[in-house]
Image: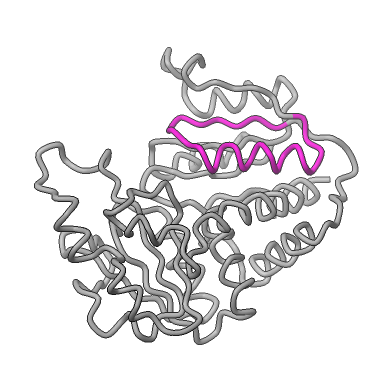
Amino acid sequence: MRNLLSMEHLTNKEVIGILLRAEEFEKGEQPSLNRSYNVANLFFEPSTRTSTSFEMAERKVGCTVIPFSASFSSALKGETMYDTVKTLEMIGLDAVVIRAVEDAYFNELLEGINIAVINAGDGVGQHPSQSLLDLYTIYKEFGKFEGLNVTIVGDITHSRVAKSNAIALKNLGVNVRFVCPQEWAGDFEAYHSWDGLLEDSDVVMLLRIQHERHAVNENFSKESYHEEFGLTFEREARMKKGAIIMHPAPVNRDVEIASGLVECERSRIFEQVRNGVFVRMAILETILKGRE
């Protein structure tokens, strides 16, 4: 494993290997890299969780984090992604973590770039590290994947989390269902109501409504969405015993989920954030050791 670009590129064995290594890190095991590596985080879209989680993980595995500010980079002068990354390679970086507005931006880096590339989100394409931390959260809870029912609810067509998790969960034997307004289904087969899905769901995974990716004049009511598709207190009460609530965040409170449920007993929303550090440590160590 030399890069992390898409969940489509990972085998189940590689996925489980990362989850087990994350578990070891959570238990206190130390990283095993043979030297310090230079890493930069190139975030061309806003981020709180992913960017700071990666930086924390990089420091914990012993990397030197080289500052990079997209708002002051030569990308504003028209420099291509390839030229930016090639420049950083020549300066002496070993890896870059990139979030970009363009779908599959990494395709132009597959030839000619000799350092590791980790995709931290491409447009409405993939978000593999988020998917892996979601998988780790589920694995910690249930100790398995085969036969679980996971219901993903929300802005499916704009969600790289939904796309990444759809691939990974199905490969691992999970029964995945999608719920969303009809116009947000995209290429997915989706239900357009919660009917019959809450009672047998082991995981209810909510997605942020990505207002920035919707047309400005799109008719959207937060109140009506919450009533029809949000996780309300009434719906939470119908969930099966032992079922959990997940959300990649940031959360639009009282839209995707009632504010009072964000930190309820079932919720793993902030636990996902914590898990992300261990998972990203495992990702970094796996990729960098694979290049030693």
Which residue appears farthest toward the right when viewing the image?
Answer: 34
Residue at left offset 58%, top offset 66%: 137
Q: Horizontally, is 286 left or right of 202 in the view? A: right
Q: Nearer the viewer, residue 74 or 275?
A: 275
Residue at left offset 59%, top offset 79%: 142
Question: x, y percentage for residue 28?
Answer: 83, 57
Query: In what quadrant of the picture does the C terminus appear?
Result: top right
Query: In what quadrant of the picture does the N terminus appear?
Result: bottom right
Q: Is residue 259 magenta?
A: no
Q: Horizontally, is 43 left or right of 220 in the view? A: right
Q: Quadrant of residue 92?
A: top right
How many dots with numbers?
0
Residue 163 in the image: above or below residue 102: below
Question: x, y percentage for residue 7?
Answer: 53, 60
Q: Is residue 61 magenta?
A: yes
Q: Horizontally, is 283 left or right of 130 in the view? A: right
Question: x, y percentage for residue 266?
Answer: 48, 70
Highlighted range, magenta: 39-64
Residue 98 in the image: above or below residue 167: above
Residue at left offset 31%, top offset 71%: 178
Residue 98 in the image: above or below residue 227: above
Q: Nearer the viewer, residue 144 or 40?
A: 144
Q: Horizontally, is 153 left or right of 21 in the view? A: left
Residue at left offset 48%, top offset 72%: 244
